[in-house]
Amino acid sequence: MGTPGGFAFEERGDGSILITHHGSKATVLRGARAEEFLEDVRADPQGVMARWTGNYKRGNERAARQHPRNQR
């Protein structure tokens, strides 16, 4: 699987954080979750934002495992 990309975040004046994916709103974090996110995001920003938005697994992992190309 490729590395996550296209994520950006913006700190809002009210203390919330808006996370976007390719310009579309993915999620808004507030309060303690926003603070925790800011601590996590320093290490691997794209990967952290993908995990926090739930945009890193698509539910097709089982189907991909059964694909003929993946049979050995």
Image: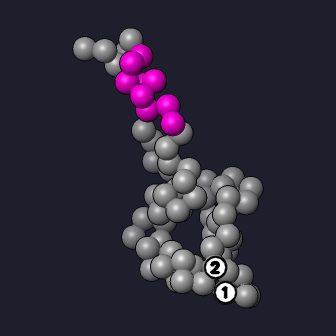
Quarter of the image for residue 7 reads bottom right
Residue at mark 1: 15
Quarter of the image for residue 69 reads top left
Disc 2 element: loop
* Observer-nearest of 66 and 42: 66
**Residue 46 in the image, given as x and y percentages of width and height:** 50, 59
Give the side of residue 71 with respect to residue 58, left or right: left
Outermost residue on the left side: it is: 72
At label 1, the amino acid type is Gly
In the rendered structure, does residue 61 fall within the stretch colored magenta?
yes
Q: Which tag is nearer the camera, tag 2 or tag 1?
A: 2
**Residue 27 in the image, given as x and y percentages of width and height:** 66, 63
Residue positioned 39% across, 18% down in the render: 66
State whether residue 31 is above or below residue 48: below
The alpha-carbon separation of the residues under discs 2 and 1 comes to 7 Å
Tag count in the figure? Answer: 2
Residue positioned 71% across, 82% down in the render: 12
For the record, the magenta segment spans: 59-67
Give the side of residue 19 with respect to residue 69, left or right: right
Q: Can residue 46 be seen in this view?
A: no
In the rendered structure, does residue 70 fall within the stretch colored magenta?
no
Quarter of the image for residue 33 reads bottom right
State whether residue 27 is above or below residue 37: above
Callout 2 touching callout 1 (CB < 8 Å): yes
At label 2, the amino acid type is Arg
**Residue 24 in the image, given as x and y percentages of width and height:** 74, 56
- Colour scheme shown: one colour
Residue at mark 2: 30
Of the image marks 2 and 1, the number of the one nearer the N terminus: 1
Classify the position of the C terminus by image quarter.
Answer: top left
